[in-house]
Each structure stands twice: as structure tokens, then as C-alpha cells.
Image (tube, rainbow, N blue to C red):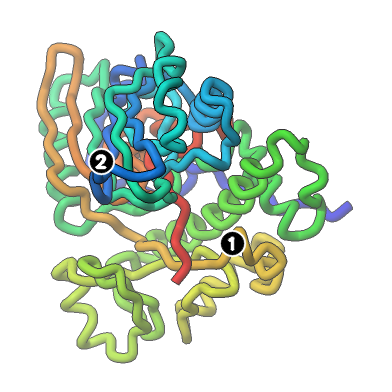
């Protein structure tokens, strides 16, 4: 059997602020240290065939929540709508939707770790990606004297240029097993039938997405190592920050000042048949990363319904980033767009360990939303 390529760990991927002294401390000592609140794209209307539930959960995985709701209400998991997955070891608040006919059974959802804070009817089912972003309040414990000043220096740099938009380690599963499954599926070393039927629908998409994410991270890491993260290259696919529109660079002299001002940002690949492709040197760099993983663009076409392909910003500027000292440590508060990981932002500050590694694929991404195809 063909041997899979050796994969780097997140700890090997470079930090943008590596030249600045970082901080020590511990993230996620308790679920209450990691609080996430979804920012909905819209509020439910009050009428309609669906019921939007504003749920608070503590130390509950995304898939575990869906199973609990389906079982308690006697519905299929497919009847449940979510805008994005949320981290397990955290206190999170988010909407999910169920058929309005379930209204009388909503009290059945209550447990010591799951609470329904409100229920409002709406005309449409909640869809993946229907959120503006997430607001985070994170406590880093066991910091050392001087860490507050060091954190403020890093925050100033990240607010100016953004932070590397890596996918967090929790994206890849325990011991990277989910990622390895995704690569094996793409190369044909395994097939969907090798996944237990009870978990096939969830794990197939998650494993393939993990493979996409690994390739994106590799492209991003190489760009940092080569000192090109803030450099616009001829042929780059850029994203307009305000609108999300994408275009290929034809004139570097025109686009570099716009990038410096934060109006546009270079993107990396989420491979798939509908992905907008770069040209020239950026295309060569992305092709090389594919080859290093033993993959070709054509292999993504076999899963086109799950991996249509898109582009992802290489850097993100956090909104409303505030850092304050507390008796227990340092409190970080900020807002991120959907699909961006808070743990990768904290990784730029923390030097003692990679932030937020999760133990299994159920802990998928505190801020995870499926990428929209272009």
C-alpha cells in the first residue's frame, strides 16, 4: 500500500510575530475560560415553519449536541439547522433551528450542560454560514510578570497587519486521524465505505475538509517562511475585505498599497473544481504543496459535491481586540469572522504550547463554518 506523506505539526508552522517576546500561561483550564457567542446574520422573524433555538452549552461537542436534539425531539439530524460548529471545551451560545412542530418538546432538551435560552419561529431553516462571526472572551491563566505588556505589543502588531489565518489543530482530529482519513480518501487509499455508517455523513465531510485545511495551512506557512505574507504577487487571488469579492492580481504596483491599507488580502487555496485559481508564481507554489502531499487537482473532483472549492484569506485583522489583566490572568476579548479560529490568534501570543489542540474530531472548531463555493 502507498505510504502517506509525513505531515508537519502545527507547532512547526511559523508565527508571524515570532520576533516579539510572547507570553506564558494556560488557555482552556476550564470551559468557562473560553466563552463564544455567535453573531447571527439575522434574527428570526417570529413566524414560520421553523423554530430557532438560542442554546447555551457547556463542554458539549457539536455532533453530541445535534444527536441530543434529534433524539430528544424525535427528528432526523437532517432536520436540524446550524450556522456553524462550536468548540467542545467551552461555554458557547448559538442558534440552531428545528421544525416548529417540535415546540411542545423543547423542555426535553434541557440538561445540566445544555440550556435553551429562547425559542423564536422563522420562515427558513438555519443554514451553514448564516452568521456574521463570533465574539470571544478568553482567559489565559498562570501568566508571568510583564506578560500584559508583551501581549499588548503583539496585539498592536496583529491589529496593524493581521494574524495568520491557520486552521487550528482541532480541525484535524486526535493524533491527526481525521486529516489522514481525508488524505486517504482523496488518494483512494480508503473509500467512504470504510467509514462506519453511523458516522459516515459527518466524518466524510469533516475528513475531506481537514485535508483541504492542511493544504491551506501548508501554503500559508510557506508564505510566512519566505517573508511574503504581506507581499502581493503577480497572479495572486486577492479578497476584498469589505465585500469578500475575489480577483487575480494583474498590477502589483496598484494592489500592494491597497493590501498595506487592509482593503484587500492575499488568499490561499481550498482546493476543489470551482476554486478560483491563481496564475504565475502563486500557482506554482500551490501546485508544489499539492505534489508534496501526493495529490493532484483532479482528485478533488471525485468529491465535488462536498469539496466544491473556494479561497480563504491568508490573514485576518481581529476586530475590537482588548486585553485586560484580571486576578486569575489575562482576559482577551475580540470578534472574528465565521470560519476563523480564536486559538490561532492566541497562538501568536502564547509561546509555551500550541493553543487549543483538541482531542477528537467532535471538538471541531470553535468558529467553524463550511466554506462557501465561489
Label 2 and label 1: CA atoms lie apart by: 34 Å
Q: How dense is the environment of label 1, judged by Cα within 10 Å: few (below 14), some, or many (20 and up)?
A: many
In the displayed structure, 308 sits above or below 113; it is below
Label placed on residue 219: none
Query: Residue drawn at (38%, 68%), measured in percent from left and top?
Result: 267
Report whether 36 appears left or right of 215: left
Residue marked by disc 2:
46
Q: Residue furthest bottom?
A: 250
Identify the image quadrant of residue 136. top left
Q: Which residue is mark 1?
A: 307
The vertical placement of 240 against 172, above or below, is below
Classify 110 as above or below 298: above
Q: Earlier in the sequence, mark 2 or mark 1?
A: 2
Q: Specify whether residue 244 is in view.
A: yes
Q: Looking at the image, is mark 2 or mark 1 nearer the viewer? A: 2
Instruction: Provide the secondary structure element on which disc 1 rests.
Output: loop
Secondary-structure class at tag 2: loop
Residue drawn at point x = 63 percent, y = 52 percent: 208
Q: Quadrant of the C terminus?
A: bottom left
Q: Position of residue 330 (x, y in %)?
A: 18, 24
Q: Residues within 10 Å of mark 2 (few under 14, many from 20)?
A: few
Q: Quadrant location of residue 229?
A: bottom left
Picture residue at 44% right of the left edge, 62% below the top: 372
Q: Position of residue 85 (x, y in %)?
A: 44, 39
Amino acid at each position: 500500500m502507498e505510504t502517506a506523506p509525513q505531515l508537519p505539526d502545527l507547532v512547526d508552522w511559523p508565527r508571524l510575530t515570532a520576533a516579539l517576546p510572547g507570553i506564558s500561561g494556560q488557555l482552556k483550564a476550564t470551559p468557562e475560560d473560553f466563552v463564544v457567542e455567535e453573531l447571527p446574520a439575522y434574527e428570526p422573524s417570529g413566524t414560520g415553519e421553523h423554530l430557532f433555538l438560542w442554546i447555551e452549552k457547556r463542554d458539549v461537542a457539536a455532533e453530541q449536541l445535534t444527536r441530543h436534539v434529534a433524539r430528544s425531539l424525535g427528528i432526523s439530524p437532517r432536520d436540524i439547522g446550524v450556522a456553524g460548529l462550536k468548540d467542545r471545551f467551552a461555554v458557547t451560545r448559538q442558534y440552531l433551528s428545528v421544525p416548529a412542530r417540535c415546540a411542545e418538546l423543547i423542555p426535553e432538551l434541557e440538561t445540566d450542560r445544555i440550556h435553551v435560552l429562547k425559542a423564536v419561529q422563522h420562515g427558513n431553516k438555519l443554514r451553514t454560514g448564516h452568521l456574521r462571526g463570533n465574539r470571544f472572551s478568553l482567559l489565559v491563566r498562570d501568566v508571568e510578570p510583564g506578560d500584559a505588556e508583551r501581549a499588548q505589543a503583539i496585539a498592536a502588531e496583529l491589529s496593524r497587519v493581521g494574524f495568520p489565518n491557520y486552521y487550528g489543530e482541532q480541525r484535524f482530529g486526535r493524533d491527526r486521524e481525521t486529516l489522514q482519513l481525508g488524505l486517504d480518501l482523496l488518494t483512494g487509499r480508503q473509500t467512504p465505505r470504510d467509514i462506519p455508517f453511523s458516522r459516515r455523513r459527518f466524518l466524510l465531510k469533516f475528513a475531506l475538509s481537514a485535508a483541504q485545511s492542511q493544504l491551506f495551512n501548508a501554503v500559508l506557512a510557506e508564505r510566512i517562511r519566505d517573508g511574503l505574507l504581506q507581499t502581493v504577487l503577480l497572479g495572486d487571488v486577492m479578497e476584498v475585505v469589505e465585500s469578500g469579492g475575489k480577483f487575480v492580481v494583474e498590477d502589483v504596483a496598484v494592489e500592494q498599497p491597497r493590501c498595506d491599507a487592509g482593503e484587500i488580502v492575499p488568499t490561499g487555496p481550498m482546493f476543489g473544481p470551482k476554486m478560483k485559481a491563481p496564475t504565475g508564481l502563486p500557482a506554482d507554489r500551490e501546485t508544489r504543496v499539492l505534489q508534496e502531499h501526493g495529490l493532484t487537482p483532479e482528485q478533488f473532483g471525485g468529491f465535488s459535491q462536498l469539496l466544491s472549492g473556494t479561497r480563504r484569506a491568508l490573514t485576518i485583522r481581529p476586530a475590537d481586540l482588548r486585553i485586560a489583566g484580571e486576578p486569575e490572568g489575562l482576559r482577551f476579548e475580540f470578534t472574528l469572522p465565521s470560519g476563523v479560529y480564536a486559538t490561532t490568534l492566541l497562538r501568536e501570543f502564547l509561546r509555551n504550547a500550541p493553543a487549543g489542540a483538541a482531542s477528537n474530531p467532535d471538538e471541531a472548531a470553535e468558529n467553524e463554518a463550511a466554506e462557501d463555493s465561489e
